Every structure is written in structure tokens, then in C-alpha cells.
Image (spheres, rainbow, N blue to C red):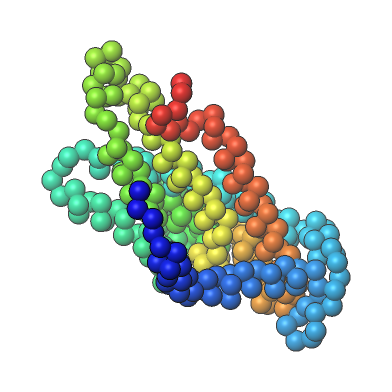
């Protein structure tokens, strides 16, 4: 066995640390530092202009007496519960279709993936707002078949579903991951299931879903975390009083309300406390997903 001289080992370690230095500095200055600062501010009364005043847990207590905060939690929960399953279902459905060999397959993949590249842009949100406005394309199309909605942007019962549709339309990212997972499923499993008389639906339930469960878990985790942080579409499309959330608070997502408290009302201490509650909430949901994944996620090599 060849022994590596200590001088070479230390030299390699030094070179590694030098290459890591930019990342470490960025992590400390742009992530950990601001996070610790916001944690401190969450225990203060701070308006950006005066010195922060220590108030202990008052910001956290006031959240539960703030009706708009509770409304933002309700709206965000409904948004996550609707948008994530719809988006994943669309991504999986299209991935199953694209997994079959056909002419122009690369073109179809690019076309379905493209919306996910521009989904978070302000310009797309403005376009989405224009096509769902009163007497616009969607309104006229529905009116032509006898469904007169009067526009989706200004009606509380339609505004949140409009944002959900925008999220679901951007299914390109999870679709690509599903497609990669489908390519890894051995064809012998489908052949064996077909020999046993399993139809398409049974093969999907007994072969595709179990073999795809790690990919499904990964996509589910990413999409839930991303859905809790959605901001641009709600802020641009449904701008209302007090920094967004209109009409009637129906699109008052958590991040929109947080922005309003911090950068419209200048209550940075309260906004920092809201940010940390969001971190705790997302962390709790993530931990719950990992806990339940033992029951439905199957990895290669697991015992039955």
C-alpha cells in the first residue's frame, strides 16, 4: 500500500480550501449572515429608520391576533394543496406520453419544458393577467359555451384558481425529472406484468408508480417548498390594497403579505418573524414528508 506524504496531503487540502473560499464567503455573507440578522430582527420592533428595539416574542404573539396573517396562511395552504397535485399530475401525464417513441419527440419535450423557464417572470404574469381579465380571451371563450364568468382577475372565487392554473402550466421541470425516472424502469417488469394479464392501469399501479416513487417523492418535496415561496405571480396579477392580495384578500399569499408588512408598512421586525415562521412551517412539512415516505417510497434494494 502506497503511503501519501504528509506534505502532499496538506497541499491538496490547502488547494481544496482555496477553491472553496468563494463559496464559503458567499455562504457566510449572503446566506448565514442575513439569516442571523433576520432572526435577531424578528425579536425587535424595527422600521428601517430607527434603531431596533428588543420586544422579545411580541411579533410572534401578534401574528395569531392578526386576521390578515391568518388569512394569508389559509390562502397559501389552499394554493399549495391545489397547485402541487395538479402540477405533478400534469407533469406525470405528459411524461408518460413523451416516454413512448414518436416522431419529433425532442421538439415536444422542448415545447412542454419551455413554460417552466419563464414561469416566474413578471412579463408572463402580465400576459396571464391580460388573458384572464374581463372580456379577454378566456372570458370570451367561456362565454361562447354559455359560461359567463365576467373575468377571473377581479372575482375572489376565480382569482386563486387562476394562479393555480399558472403554476400547473409550468410543469416542465418535474416533467423532465419524471421522464428520466421512467427511462430507468426495466422493460422486463412490464413484460412480466403483461404475461400475468395485467392491463395498462394495473401495470401503472403495480409497476410504474412503485418504481417511480423516489422520483415522485423528490418532485413532491421540491414543488411543495417552491409553492410556499410563490410571490411574483400573486403580486403582479392580483395587486390590491396594502401591497397585493386582491380581490378581497383571495390571493393574499404568505410571501405577498410578508412583503407588504416589511416594505409597505416598514415593520421589518414583524416581517422577519413571519419569515422565520415560514421556515419553521416548511421545515415541519418537509420532516412530515420524510417521515411518511417510509410507507410509500420504494428504493432499489429495499426489502419487501
Q: Residue at x 51, y 47 (%)?
A: 221
Q: Is residue 280 visible?
A: yes
- Residue 216, given in percent of the width and then of the height, sits at 43, 40
Is residue 191 shown above or below 168? Answer: above
- Residue 251, given in percent of the width and then of the height, sits at 60, 59
Q: Residue at x 69, y 61 (%)?
A: 276
Q: Residue at x 86, y 70 (%)?
A: 55
User: Total number of numbered labels?
Assistant: 0
Q: Quadrant of residue 194?
A: top left
Q: Is residue 201 visible?
A: no
In this image, 85 relative to 260: left or right?
left
In this image, 131 relative to 100: left or right?
right
In terms of depth relative to the viewer, which is nearer, 185 or 196? Answer: 185
Q: Residue at x 31, y 44 (%)?
A: 180
In this image, 209 relative to 34: left or right?
left
Is residue 229 shown above or below 161? Answer: below
Q: Quadrant of residue 192?
A: top left
In terms of depth relative to the viewer, which is nearer, 172 or 79? Answer: 172
Task: Residue at the far bottom: name it.
Answer: 49
Task: Residue at the far top: name it.
Answer: 196
Is residue 271 shown above or below 218? Answer: below
- Residue 66, given in percent of the width and then of the height, sits at 79, 61
- Residue 255, given in percent of the width and then of the height, sits at 61, 64
Amino acid at each position: 500500500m502506497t503511503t501519501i506524504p504528509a506534505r502532499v496531503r496538506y497541499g491538496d487540502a490547502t488547494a481544496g480550501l482555496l477553491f472553496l473560499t468563494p463559496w464559503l464567503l458567499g455562504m457566510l455573507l449572503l446566506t448565514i449572515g442575513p439569516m442571523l440578522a433576520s432572526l435577531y430582527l424578528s425579536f425587535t420592533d424595527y422600521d428601517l429608520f430607527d434603531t431596533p428595539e428588543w420586544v422579545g416574542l411580541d411579533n410572534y404573539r401578534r401574528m395569531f391576533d392578526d386576521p390578515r396573517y391568518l388569512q394569508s396562511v389559509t390562502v397559501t395552504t389552499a394554493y399549495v394543496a391545489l397547485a402541487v397535485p395538479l402540477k405533478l399530475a400534469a407533469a406525470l401525464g405528459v411524461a408518460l406520453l413523451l416516454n413512448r417513441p414518436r416522431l419529433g419527440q425532442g421538439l415536444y419535450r422542448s415545447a412542454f419544458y419551455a413554460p417552466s423557464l419563464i414561469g416566474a417572470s413578471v412579463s408572463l404574469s402580465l400576459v396571464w393577467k391580460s388573458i384572464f381579465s374581463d372580456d379577454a380571451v378566456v372570458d370570451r371563450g367561456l362565454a361562447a359555451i354559455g359560461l359567463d364568468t365576467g373575468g377571473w382577475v377581479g372575482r375572489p372565487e376565480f382569482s386563486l384558481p387562476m394562479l393555480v392554473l399558472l403554476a400547473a402550466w409550468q410543469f416542465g421541470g418535474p416533467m423532465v425529472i419524471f421522464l428520466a425516472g421512467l427511462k430507468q424502469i426495466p422493460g422486463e417488469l412490464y413484460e412480466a406484468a403483461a404475461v400475468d394479464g395485467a392491463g395498462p392501469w394495473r401495470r401503472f399501479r403495480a409497476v410504474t408508480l412503485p418504481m417511480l416513487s423516489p422520483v415522485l417523492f423528490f418532485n413532491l418535496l421540491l414543488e411543495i417548498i417552491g409553492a410556499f415561496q410563490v410571490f411574483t405571480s400573486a403580486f403582479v396579477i392580483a395587486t390590491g390594497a396594502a401591497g397585493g392580495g386582491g380581490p378581497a384578500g383571495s390571493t393574499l399569499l404568505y410571501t405577498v403579505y410578508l412583503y407588504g408588512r416589511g416594505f409597505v408598512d416598514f415593520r421589518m421586525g414583524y416581517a422577519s418573524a413571519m419569515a422565520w415562521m415560514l421556515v419553521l412551517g416548511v421545515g415541519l412539512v418537509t420532516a412530515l414528508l420524510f417521515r411518511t415516505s417510509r410507507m410509500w417510497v420504494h428504493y432499489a434494494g429495499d426489502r419487501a
